Amino acid sequence: MKKLSFKKGWFPMDGLAFNGKLDFPREPVLEVFSPREILLPMLQHVGSPAEPVVKIGEKVEVGQMIGRASGPLSAPVHTGISGTVTGIKSFELLNRKHCLAVEITNDHKKTIHNSIRRRENPEQLTPANISKLIEFSGIVGMGGEGYPSAAKCKRAYQDGVSTLIVNACQSEPYLSGDIHLMREQLDRVIRGAGALSGFCKVKNVVFCVMDKWLIELEAIQDAFKRFQKIYPDRKFIVRVMRSRFPQGYERLLIKALYGIELPAGQRPENTVGAVVFNVSTCAAVADMVEKNMPLVQRIISISGDTMQGHNMLVPIGTYVDDILARVPGASSANRIVMGGAITGVCLEDTHVPIIKTTQGLALVRKSDPPKTPCVHCGACIDACPVGLQPYLCHRLLEVGDIKAVEQLGVAECISCGACSFVCPAGKELAFAIARAGHRSRRKERS
């Protein structure tokens, strides 16, 4: 089977020695974590924040709505534990935005809300039924984007898309939650994709998987044959992608599949007639359609440069420091990174919650390599998947020549971090360039 990809980028399995544990994502280890308390920010998604619908002192149950969506581009918030609401306060997110957050103390009874019940014949739900369920569920893009799934489906339907793409290309090293779902709960993922395809009224469902996971390919194709009987009007297809970072980015996925450069700010729905969903998002949709269970928990990958990693299932809102208390040697880490080891955010304070878009935690103990002047090796140019010249952009930013940087196309930056990671001089190229790209895109929109 032909392997698809984009140009440039880099191959983590060839060049990354993260404690030599290159194969740990193949481990199906999954620990279920029950925290003492959780904090649920009302803004875990693109759009306007949810509005709290509970009061301090109120008893809540698993699956109960805590925050109501406040507009067409918003998402409700639900609790993954039962217990008592102990606080409603202002909270600063990692992106410096502020919103209200609801704190709940766990009673460890795991009492399920009476709205959570298994649904008979979920495949017979109409698109209108599925629309209402997804809108209530609070499901958002769980691969990092955080776009409300209900709004995305409606947009796809309005644009008349013909293809639904399931992005199973979790290309960042040591994030393996999606791989766990594809290995251990494949039917659940396909059922979710089937429901989404019904909502969007598409006929083609394309699963994009990395070539390093070809052991799953036969199981995927066998599953497709079974589901073809359930969804006879849909065609299930698998496409194999090269294990190149950052293949999981939507723009690069479209480039590999269609050979089309998706300009910054453009959407695949109205460009190639396709809508893209993450594996974890599909699994969450299956839970809502089949059990009426909204998005209340997710898998995160715990990894580090001196530890063996594993996957953990946690209620959304679990504090990072509660999780780290269960990880041997976590207190000796120099840095805790929320998200991927390459694209994540270094935490100043670990008393922050896991949110809907959090894919993992990386514990870094080793010190940074010494920083030296640029050696003009060109490694950052070879790695940049959108064809920028990171070393030149960074140099121009250092001297304040913003106009020249914009002329070099900095608005195309996708913040993947590849340039910083491959730099032998240890220069932190990505942060400044990504910030300049964000400013440039904002200027173009205004």
Image (spheres, grey):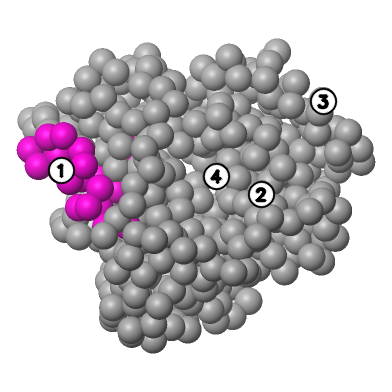
Amino acid, disc 3: Lys
Q: Height in image: 10 above or below 298?
A: above
Segment colored magenta: 318-344
Residue under numbered circle 4: 280
Residue under numbered circle 3: 225
- Asked whether disc 1 touches disc 4, contact meaning CB atoms under 8 Å apart, the reply is no
The quarter of the picture where residue 21 lies is top left
Task: Judge from the rendering whether residue 373 lies leftward or rightward of residue 87; answer left or right.
Answer: left
Could you say which is closer to the camera, residue 246 or residue 329? 329
* Whole-number angstrom distance, CA of label 2 to CA of label 4: 10 Å
Q: Residue at x 38, y 49 (%)?
A: 314
Question: Which mark is first along the chain, 2 or 1?
Answer: 2
Crowding near the residue tagged with mark 3, few <14, some 14–19, many ≥20 C-alpha atoms within 10 Å:
few
Q: Nearer the viewer, mark 1 or mark 2?
A: 2
Amino acid, disc 1: Arg
Provide the secondary structure element on which disc 1 rests. Answer: strand
Q: Nearer the viewer, mark 1 or mark 4?
A: 4
